[in-house]
Image (spheres, rainbow, N blue to C red):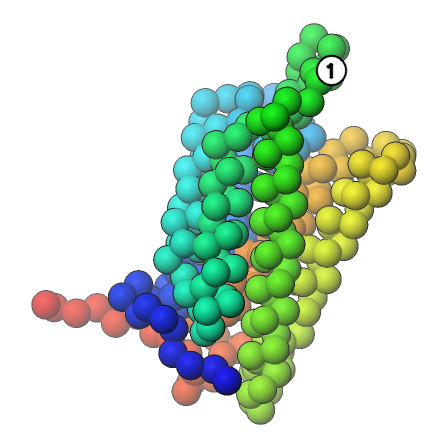
Amino acid sequence: MDRKPLDTEIDHHTAKFIVGFIALSLAAFTDLLTPRVSISSISLSYHLTDNARNVFVSSLCVISAFLWSYNGYSLFQAVLSKVAAVAVAAVAFFPCDCFTGRFDGGAAREATVTGVVHTASAISMFIILAIFCWLFYLRARNKGSKEAKVRGLIYRVCAVAMVGAMSVQLLDILGVDFSGITQRLTYYVEATGLMAFGVAWMTASRMLPFITNEDERVKIELSGR
């Protein structure tokens, strides 16, 4: 049964909106900040320019902080968000092993512990975020409004997009050749996952019109105090 969030000192609707916006825009920003390179992975931006690295790390740190503050509507969601926060922070502070190939003089580097932690954390992050999409869907399903039904559809689409993106990446790891389709497979996989995450959490913020009725919509009020 739903209950109030465990801790309401930080407004979780605002947190969802901010987190969603950052996740939605991260892929585009890192791509724009590496103008001379079509990056094959969002994580690769860490190694290319100072601006791209700063945006990549700081954005993930903000997302991690908000996920840590989010307690959801149950102890399970509170624990899940804390694990996701740690995973996101690990993605930021443990650089990937993707600085290879033409960016590295043609010599691929062997996998490192840091790179393995990065990859494992990224996978864990997307799995947990897909679970959250499903939890958001279950909550919306229990409401009878047409706006809630639309939100439920959005959550399901986002969950499927995340799982589908991870499945494609897994096939690539297992040896399926996607080079005939794109040379930026990992980038598009990461971008798809992040954008699905962003859309889902902005939807869950209950700040967006058309998919939130007046009784549910959260409005930001400025106080003179």
Q: Quadrant of residue 160?
A: bottom right
Amino acid tagged 1 = Ala
Furthest residue in direction bottom, as rendered: 144
**Residue 197 locus on image (x, y percent):** 58, 56
Q: Mark 1, residues whose alpha carbon is within 10 Å: few (<14), some, or many (≥20)?
A: some
* In the image, farthest residue toward the left: 225
Q: Residue at x 10, y 68 (%)?
A: 225
Looking at this view, is 4 or 168 the one in front? 4
Which residue lies under the disc numbered 1? Answer: 108
Residue appearing at x 70%, y 16% in the figure = 109
Q: Find residue 12 and report its image quarter.
A: bottom left
Q: How many marks?
A: 1
Horizontal arrangement in the rendering, residue 129 relative to residue 173 (left or right)? left
User: Is 38 situated above or below 107?
Assistant: below
The location of residue 155, given as percent across then percent down, is: 63, 69
Nearer-the-camera pick, 96 or 185: 96
Q: Residue at x 55, y 21 (%)?
A: 48
Residue 183 at what x, y percent from top left?
Answer: 78, 31
**Left or right of 21 on screen, residue 39:** right
Does residue 201 appear anywhere in the picture?
Answer: yes
Determine which quarter of the picture holds residue 133.
bottom right
For this view, does 179 lie left or right of residue 78? right
Which residue, as the protein is rendered here, is positioned at the far top? Answer: 105
Residue 19 in view: no
Q: Residue at x 77, y 42 (%)?
A: 169
Q: Secondary structure at mark 1?
A: loop
Q: As drawn, is 56 to the left or to the right of 107?
A: left
